[in-house]
């Protein structure tokens, strides 16, 4: 019989494995121009395809989150003091999946058709395999027994709030029948805002607008970096050197440059998602700074990269700096947003929010 710690480790590793193949929509620019030429699409039509992918990903999340919150075997509560670090690692690997696939596109495939087949089969099989080990690990037996429903003597009447909270888990009641009112104040302090209440909450509306505006600029660049690379490549007086290929033709050179920038976006986004987790936990736990400060940092980063792209970039030699900054800002934004949402509006309906 495997111990609880081993089961938790296996379950968490399966989450990381699934995350590695779950961010393929960030890969769109690696093959968008090939589809555009093959099917004779214009820029508007190819952007509609990329936008449809984004709409499918982001508009489906509230529905799936509702299912998780209401029909999952356990709640989606986030209760650790270092929860941002825990969340940021799977989210970081989700951002890194575009890098893994773009490298496969460079070294293993010469045409887009077989590359798309590889994406379809590899993502499906990996998710199926990972889901087999994604298990619900029950709470330790001594905790479950101590806080069993209907047990009047499991916790003494004079128990302190810290002792009561120390025995509880996400799946067990926080109070027994004889708990004092002072403990109720301690437990009920977490907010619980969801559904239509979000649209009536000023903080929620502000956060939604921030995420929409900031994420929109990042997604715009992610979906169009392939077209930007091709345009600047032809506009450059000299073709730039890059570390991933020795070009044998114009098309292969552009393809490798597109894959390079998709990889750079992916790596910088992954780094942003990883580092913002521990950084946000440290600033909150040790310096009592709100996680909103991390959102401000992401806003400044994305604002600066847009200015660089507008005023400074004129050829391929400088584009990589903008790509790296956008990836870093976009990753920072998505690394901090889930935990910010959980802390401001509660973890009871975290998936839907």
Image (tube, rainbow, N blue to C red):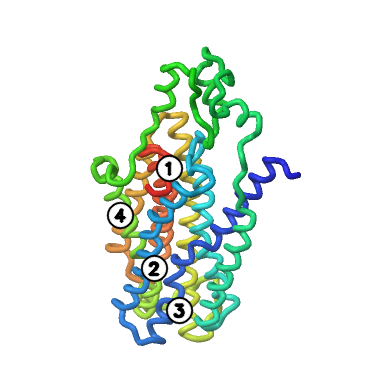
For the residues labelled 2 and 3, the Cα–Cα distance comes to 23 Å
Q: Residue at x 23, y 42 (%)?
A: 200
Work out whether residue 106 or residue 173 is closer to the camera in this orientation and state it.
173
* Percent x, y of residue 161: 49, 20
Label 4 residue SS: helix
Quarter of the figure with the N terminus: top right
Residue 206, horizontal then vertical, whole percent: 26, 45
Pointer 1 or 4: first along the chain: 4
Mark 3 Cα-neighbour bin, 10 Å: few <14, some 14–19, many ≥20: many
Q: To which residue does mark 2 refer?
A: 53
Question: Label 3 to label 4, Cα distance in Å?
Answer: 31 Å
- 61 or 329, which is in the foreground? 61
Numbered label attached to residue 339: 1
Mark 2 Cα-neighbour bin, 10 Å: few <14, some 14–19, many ≥20: some
N-terminal label among 1 and 3 = 3
Instruction: Name the residue rendered at 29%, 44% in the picture.
Output: 198
Q: Nearer the viewer, mark 1 or mark 3?
A: 1
Real-space Cα separation, disc 1 to disc 2, in angstroms = 25 Å
**How far apart are the two marked residues, 1 and 4, measured between alpha carbons?**
17 Å
Q: Which mark is residue 254?
A: 3
In this rendering, is residue 102 above or below 207?
below
- Rounded to the nearest angstrom, the CA distance separating label 4 from label 2 is 16 Å
Indicate left or right for 217 with 140 as reference: left
Which one is nearer the viewer's eye here, 25 or 200?
Answer: 200
**Vertically, is 16 above or below 121?**
above
Q: Where residue 304 appears, x then y in whole percent?
A: 32, 54
Q: Which residue is mark 4?
A: 212
């Amino acid at each position: 019989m495997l111990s609880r710690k081993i089961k938790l480790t296996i379950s968490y590793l399966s989450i990381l494995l699934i995350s590695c193949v779950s961010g393929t929509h960030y890969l769109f620019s690696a093959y968008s121009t090939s589809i555009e030429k093959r099917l004779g699409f214009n820029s508007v039509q190819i952007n509609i395809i990329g936008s449809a992918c984004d709409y499918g990903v982001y508009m489906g999340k509230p529905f799936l989150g509702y299912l998780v919150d209401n029909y999952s075997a356990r709640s989606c509560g986030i209760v650790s003091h270092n929860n941002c670090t825990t969340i940021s690692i799977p989210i970081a690997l989700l951002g890194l999946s575009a890098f893994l696939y773009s490298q496969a596109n460079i070294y293993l495939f010469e045409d887009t058709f077989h590359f798309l087949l590889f994406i379809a089969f590899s993502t499906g099989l990996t998710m199926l395999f990972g889901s087999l080990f994604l298990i619900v690990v029950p709470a330790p037996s001594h905790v479950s027994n101590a806080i069993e429903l209907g047990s009047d003597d499991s916790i003494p009447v004079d128990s302190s709030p810290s002792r009561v909270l120390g025995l509880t888990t996400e799946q067990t009641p926080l109070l027994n029948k004889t708990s004092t009112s002072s403990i109720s104040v301690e437990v009920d302090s977490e907010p619980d805002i969801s559904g239509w209440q979000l649209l009536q909450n000023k903080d929620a509306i502000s956060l939604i607008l921030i995420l929409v505006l900031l994420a929109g600029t990042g997604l715009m660049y992610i979906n169009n970096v392939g077209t930007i690379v091709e345009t600047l490549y032809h506009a450059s007086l000299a073709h730039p050197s890059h570390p991933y290929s020795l070009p044998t033709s114009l098309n292969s050179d552009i393809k490798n440059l597109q894959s390079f920038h998709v990889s750079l976006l992916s790596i910088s986004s992954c780094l942003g998602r990883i580092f913002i987790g521990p950084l946000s936990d440290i600033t909150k736990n040790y310096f009592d700074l709100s996680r909103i400060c991390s959102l401000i940092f992401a806003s400044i980063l994305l604002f600066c990269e847009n200015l660089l792209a507008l005023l400074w970039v004129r050829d391929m030699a400088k584009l990589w700096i903008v790509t790296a900054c956008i990836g870093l800002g976009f990753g920072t934004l998505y690394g901090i947003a889930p935990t910010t949402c959980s802390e401001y509006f509660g973890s009871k309906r975290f998936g839907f929010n």
